[in-house]
Amino acid sequence: MTAGRGETLSGAAAPTRLRCENNVDPLGIDALQPRLSWQLSDGRRGVRQTAYELQVASSGDGLARGEADRWSTGRVEAADSLVVYDGAPLGSRDGCWWRVRTWDADGAATPWSDAAHFEVGLVRPFNFPAYSDWRATLIRSAVVGTRTDGVPAPFMRRQFTVPGDVVSARLYITAQGLYEAWINGRRVGHDRHRPGWTDYRIRLPYQTHDVTDLVANGDNAIGAILGDGWFCGHVAIAGGRQGYGDRPGLFAQLEIEVAGEDERLVIATDADWLTTTGPILSSDNYLGEHHDARLELPGWSEAGMDTTAWEPVQLGAPILAGLVATVAPPVRAVAELRPVAQWESAPGVHVFDLGQNMVGHVRLRVAGAPAGTTIQLRHAEVLDADGRTIWTANLHRAIATDSYTCRGDAVETWEPRFTFHGFRYVEVTGHPGTPSLDDVTGVVVHSAMTPTGEFECSNALISRLYQNIVWSWRGNSVDLPTDCPQRYERLGWTGDIAMFARTAVFLEDAQEFLRKWIHDLIDSQIVGGVEDGQFPTVAPRSSRWGGGPAWADAAVFVPWALYTAYGDTTTLTEIYPALQRWMGYLAREEAGRAPGSWIGFGDWVSLDTDPDNPLGPDDRWGGTSLAFLRDAFRAHATDLVGRIADVIGRRHDAAEWFEVADRRRRAFVTAHVVDGRLAEPTQTGCTLALTFDLLPDAASRQAVGEDLAKDVESRGHLVTGFVGTPWLLHALERAGRLDLAYQLIEREELPGWLYPVTQGATTMWERWDAWTPERGFHPSGMNSFNHYAYGAVGHWLHRTIGGLDIDDERPGSGRLRIAPRPGGSIRSGRAALQTTSGAASCAWELADGRMQLAFTIPPNRSATVLLPARSTHAVVGSLADVDGVSDLRSVDGFVAFEAAAGSYELTIADPVVA
Ligand code: BGC
């Protein structure tokens, strides 16, 4: 490619990773001003973008010729690599091709990038003919289950004729319940559990599939199988089944462009579809799925099938919810695990160990079983005290049992479609022989986010801890962030993700996944019969409960974590009106004019509990009073609302929120600080007061830091629950007691993060003491072995041991923070992150009294570097002469500087080790 007139080429490669709405070449977006982003691929030291040019065309060929008929920005002097489309108005079905080139600091241009593509979906969101792109009608079967029992999964189909060659075809599809679509005997796409879980009363996401290759000139058939899913299957708290409706329904529109025809051929769900039941006897997220292969319907989604036994569908009422394009990444089968062991726990009871607590389902293979043989699969996270039998008491009413009845083929393979389980062990019964390791495969299923973060260090247990955090995050991201994936719950608990968001955004590109959940949270504020402005305990909302301190605060923590990690203000803007309503609610409550509809969970599952009164007088849990937590979170949240208002340009609002935050901080001090110290100097109390900057002055911060250290020292361990744990190590570090933070993280005994690891845990436990050698399993009914909340320590691991983080003092600036702080017995650490600008990393090693440090800052970014060096003289070679290093200074006795993009290697003599 050549440069434009008078351009110099930089010699750098063209921009890469072009994304629209954070997706590669998405189909069916409904943002009419989509976000377009790219990365530079230029490894030169200090490289930064000074300008860009973007071209958007309605055809790929046109774009290649430079005919940017939709939008051409010309050269724009800016460092941004995220731009909001502002060209010719877009409408339903519009396809766009786009490309970008950039200029560097010397004014030299890159070549044009390869072309990327996006296509708009059906943007008129209502199911009313006059206003809508949709010609579909909701179709359902006549068969209805009850509040307690499901019915066989309906199959739906329709045959149609295409009168010519197919130019292109799109399937726009969603369901009340879950769907799996098929055309001409072939499955459409690979997604599972579509359309996912939203508050179906408000928002129903649809998906767009390119099915050009699946339809053809002549006779065709389209079909779908429906599952109950979250729509009419069991959802805890709501109580029983049918939380949103009594049966599943399908809503779909196949649009085919036929050669030589002016009008698109549209096959929409309508009265011409037929329905029947087949092999899926029942399916439910908690209960499992039962499949009788003798009832399969060969050819059910192909043309020419004999449909005499099929019934006409029933038409449902118009869908009142907004039909919105899917935002979240699809749930998919992302990995497979082969069992590492198997045994017979009793005659005919075969137990398989997958070696990893995972979420998804089992693929079963059976050879030589006579027709009618029913094989049952039960799932469990752990084994009972005998070490051989599966233990399922912690699943509550989620019996997590699948079954498969054989049709009698020589070899049969089956996996469920509409259920998922959290398990490491699988119990197989009813097998006619002895199943082998090849017969059971663990299929790992979750929202397919791109992994972005890595961490390891010389302490193998801590490295394993990090992997456990990753697995718990994956297992709890089946379309929405949940508390746990196994028991009768699996809900979008607000407090859990509030605490974990800052870790999540490092582990994976969670931007659109969490943005989708923020939409759920926004919706949840205005349903449930308590529309008072408070955010709930769970989103989508399935109870009247309002969230208490730390739970409702997900509304600020999650969007702020997204903004910090990805520098994108979209979610902040989207949630801001809901935050205003929330602040209004808090003000009314403070003035005694709101009933206080929230429920507080205190410092949930903390060990800091009065044994005689575990729930305390006004506490749900933990030694830190609810009044303390309420006042602390309120002040901090208000400050964050102010910062959010500021970032999205609501400066006047921001100033007001900052005033309110000040007032709330003062109220906190009046109520909870006595002579500079906390009236409740619990570990969680001190941690929050320090982290949220609630204390009146430096002397008070010092005193509270000392009290925190004293408590940790005297106990020798942590006692914090969900609420204090995420910030405990940060707070100790800030209080100048990094040594104690290292003691806590390296502690292998109960309670501490490594205790479960020493017990063979492969995911994070809900409780510090979920299992102890003396007592066995915790007596509470709630004892999950896959809860990410305590995994919030992941943030501290990659930040302090790994030495890599986003600079959250300047969120949105894209600046990174490189600041490894060695301590304890740890001799080396490494963290890496795929940022929106490319790869960043930091790795260090201690040897012979020196620290070797290597770090990389991606193009168009910079970093604040804090070296554990006592002075600049301790850095071997002259830092001041290193290209890309500026603003060399001393911060808190350490060497600090700003570093431009590029890779660096340094040696520090006699480094500071905690
Ligand atoms: C969930 C938690 C949740 C809590 C509320 C539990 O049952 O599993 O993770 O935050 O309830 O305290």
Image (cartoon, grey):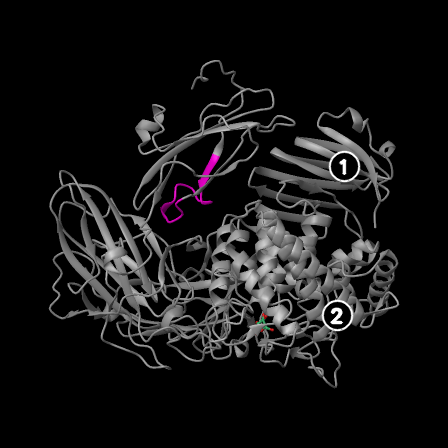
Q: Is residue 222 magenta?
A: no
Q: Position of residue 762 (x, y in %)?
A: 59, 61
Q: Position of residue 765 (x, y in %)?
A: 62, 67
Residue at 74 percent across and 63 percent down: it is: 665
Provide the residue span drawn in magenta.
17-32
Q: Nearer the viewer, residue 77 or 652?
A: 652
Q: Bin the neighbour count of mark 2 within 10 Å (Cα to Cα): few under 14, some 14-19, many 20 and up.
A: many
Q: Is residue 272 left or right of residue 439?
A: left
Q: Position of residue 746 (x, y in %)?
A: 76, 58
Question: In which quadrant of the rendered view does residue 704 lie?
Answer: bottom right
Q: Which residue is mark 2?
A: 719
Q: Is residue 18 magenta?
A: yes
Q: Is residue 561 left or right of residue 256?
A: right
Residue 297 in the image: above or below residue 78: below
Q: Nearer the viewer, residue 487 or 664?
A: 664
Q: Nearer the viewer, residue 133 or 105?
A: 133
Dot 2: element: loop
Q: Is residue 35 visible?
A: yes
Q: Amino acid at mark 1?
A: Gln
Q: Pick the quarter of the image with the N terminus.
A: top left
Q: Which residue is mark 1?
A: 852
Residue 270 in the image: above or below residue 163: below
Q: How far is disc 1 from disc 2 in space, using C-alphas?
A: 35 Å
Q: Position of residue 647 (x, y in %)?
A: 60, 47
Dot in front, 1 or 2 = 2
Residue at 82 percent across and 64 percent down: it is: 708
Q: Amino acid at mark 2?
A: Val
Q: Is residue 718 visible?
A: no
